[in-house]
Amino acid sequence: MAGLNDIVRAPDERLSTACAPVETIDDATRALAGRMLEDMYAADGCGLAAPQIGELVQMIVIDVDYADGPRNPYVLVNPRVIVADGPERTTSEGCLSFPGISVGVTRPSHVVVEATNLDGELMRYEAQDNLLAVCLQHEIDHLRGVTMVDHLSPLRRVSALRAYQEALAAGARPGETAVE
Ligand code: ZN
């Protein structure tokens, strides 16, 4: 089941649905986290949200380090953005649910996020001006049914969605952000 075919691609109602909090951390929660990490690594992604594999619960996985070194996965259960401030930055973002495109998204450069880990401990993550700051905001957006194209102006959204349709027609797979 795990792997690229596990990943929900836009358009899909599950990508625009608000997700329910995780009530208890149990074996099913840990299994879901494992499946999400497996899918994320299979697609060479740096983050994945549960709705992207069709599970409408508030959980994300992130690893912004393994491109340059060993895997360093974070699992965030019920993450909440506590602070989002600092100068806004525009970064080119991709999304495993939109294979074949990347779009420039403008977001605050500094975030503080609180989340529960798989041991049930409340954790705090802070990031500024780096991939983690972008990734945390992108993935937590998914939990409220917001995707990267929702941040674009109407005109840019239309052109991004057109490029996405062309990429899909050309056979783009999750993890690809540009088509040859
Ligand atoms: Zn995404």
Image (spheres, rainbow, N blue to C red):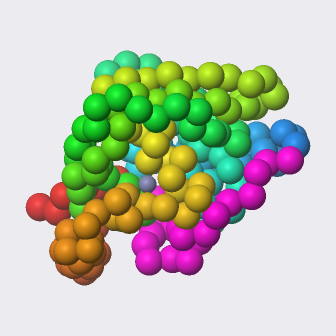
Is 8 inside the magenta-drawn segment?
yes
Against 38, residue 158 (above or below) is: below
Residue 14 location, x and y as percent? 59, 71
Most extreme residue toward the left is 180
Q: Main secondary structure of the magenta part?
A: loop
Residue 101 seen? yes
Q: Residue at x 59, y 33 (%)?
A: 82
Q: Is residue 160 at all visible to an observer of this figure?
A: no
Q: Is residue 114 left or right of residue 99?
A: right
- The percent coordinates of residue 165 (x first, y second) are 26, 79
Q: Quadrant of residue 128?
A: top left
117 versus 69 height, above or below: below
Q: Give x and y (percent) for residue 132.
A: 41, 30
Q: Is residue 174 above or below residue 120?
A: below
- In reply to whether residue 59 is colored magenta, the answer given is no
Q: Residue furthest top?
A: 69
In this rendering, would 154 be left or right of 66? left
Task: Determine the residue positioned at 36% across, 37% down.
Answer: 108
Pick the residue in front: 169 or 128. Answer: 128
Residue 53: % across, % down: 59, 61
Q: Which quarter of the rendered image does ligand 1 occupy?
A: bottom left
Bounds of the magenta segment = 1-23
